[in-house]
């Protein structure tokens, strides 16, 4: 299935680690829709992941960048325009990491160095990416910037830990920067709030397997897959959504609007 929705468009895709990554599926789908792009990830992920394979099959160039480093981001933006031959039309921020979660620290026992680091990687990096693009005047008019988030920004999911706060901050940045990017450059900025998805980042959350099964039963359409998230992202990069901006868009099979489903009620029936 391909409609050439992104023919002639150029972009930067952050966060493809392996074939489970939402960014990996997005890169494949953008490629199928005619877009060209630079792939980027943290230097350490170059060694751990399989980004080279993805670059080969999508004809992309890889530029390593730590998304917390302004220097790395400025270099990424400048080099991307050189490689792609012009200004940027779309950007995907698919980055998340909590050091507290990784080290097994609960929400009520955070080590604040870990909290700061996780916030910088997962939330502030979105501001840094956009500030770098904005200052370099790197985005084409009617370009589109998307970051991925989770509903723990609105409702409490205890094991999501400090990532809940990071996602709330990330979503706020989309609204605040979306105002300036809209006014000054006619660029839209949105977040997609995605269903739980079995990726490296997702599976780091305690109790993830039970939770994904619960969400599947709660969502009238079932959980949205990584591939479906990629397809939704492509629509936001396309010219068919030009006036959608500063929004947090739920892509979750209806989970966020469901109080309880019949399947869950049945499990509690005597
Ligand atoms: N998996 C889920 O259940 C789920 C649900 C909703 C939202 N999301 C969000 O989707 C996004 C993508 O995650 P994913 O689930 O595909 O997992 P993933 O583990 O495949 O991707 C996370 C990426 O972040 C990158 N990253 C970490 N630190 C970085 C840094 N300093 N600089 C640059 N990149 C860095 C990692 O290398 C990795 O590629 C994240 O924002 C995540 O919070 C995931």
Image (tube, rainbow, N blue to C red):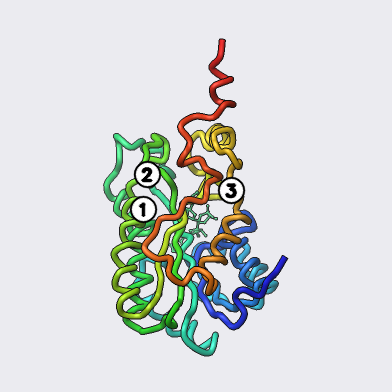
Question: Front-most of 119 and 43?
Answer: 119
Residue drawn at (37%, 39%) of the image? 155
**Percent coordinates x, y for residue 53 in the rendering:** 67, 68
Query: Marks 2 and 1, how far apart in space?
Result: 8 Å
Asked whether the residues under the numbered discs 2 and 1 touch, taking CB atoms below 8 Å apart as contact, a structural biologist would say yes
Label 3 vs label 1, nearer the camera: 3
Residue drawn at (29%, 64%) of the image? 176
Residue drawn at (56%, 80%) of the image? 9
Question: Front-most of 169 and 61?
Answer: 169
* Residue 115 visible in rendering: yes
Question: Front-most of 244 and 146?
Answer: 244
The residue beneath circle 3 is 224
Which of the 4 image quadrants contains residue 3? bottom right
Query: Marks 3 and 2, how far apart in space?
Result: 27 Å
Query: Marks 3 and 1, how far apart in space?
Result: 25 Å
Q: Name the secondary structure under disc 2.
A: helix
Q: Is residue 9 left or right of residue 187?
A: right
Q: Rate crowding at label 3 as few (under 14), some (14 to 19) or many (20 or more) other CA atoms within 10 Å.
A: many
User: Is tag 2's residue or tag 1's residue first in the polypeptide sequence?
Assistant: 2
**Percent coordinates x, y for residue 173 in the rendering:** 32, 61
Which of the 4 image quadrants contains residue 66? bottom left
Q: Is mark 2 within 8 Å of ligand 1?
A: no
Query: Looking at the rendered structure, which numbered label has been put on residue 118?
Result: 1
């Amino acid at each position: 299935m391909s409609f050439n929705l992104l023919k002639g468009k150029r972009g930067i895709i952050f966060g493809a680690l392996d074939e489970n990554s939402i960014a990996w599926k997005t890169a494949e789908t953008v490629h199928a829709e005619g877009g060209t792009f630079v792939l980027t990830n943290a230097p350490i992920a170059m060694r751990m992941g399989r980004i080279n394979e993805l670059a080969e099959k999508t004809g992309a160039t890889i530029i390593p960048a730590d998304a917390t480093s302004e220097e790395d981001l400025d270099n990424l933006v400048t080099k991307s325009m050189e490689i792609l031959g012009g200004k940027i039309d779309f950007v995907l921020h698919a980055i998340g990491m909590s050091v507290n979660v990784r080290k097994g620290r609960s929400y009520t026992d955070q080590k604040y160095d870990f909290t700061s680091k996780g916030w910088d990687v997962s939330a502030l990096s979105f501001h840094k990416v956009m500030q770098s693009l904005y200052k370099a005047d790197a985005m084409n008019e009617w370009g589109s910037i998307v970051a991925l988030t989770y509903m723990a920004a609105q409702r409490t999911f205890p094991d999501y830990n400090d990532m809940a706060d990071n996602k709330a901050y990330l979503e706020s940045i989309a609204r605040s920067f979306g105002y300036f990017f809209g006014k000054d450059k006619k660029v839209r900025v949105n977040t997609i709030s995605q269903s739980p998805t079995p990726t490296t980042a997702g599976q780091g959350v305690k109790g993830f397997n039970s939770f994904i099964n619960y969400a599947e039963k709660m969502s009238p359409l079932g959980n949205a897959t990584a591939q479906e998230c990629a397809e939704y992202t492509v629509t936001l990069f396309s010219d068919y959504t030009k006036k959608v901006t500063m929004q947090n868009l739920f892509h979750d099979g209806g989970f966020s609007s469901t109080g309880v489903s019949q399947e869950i009620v049945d499990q509690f029936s005597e």
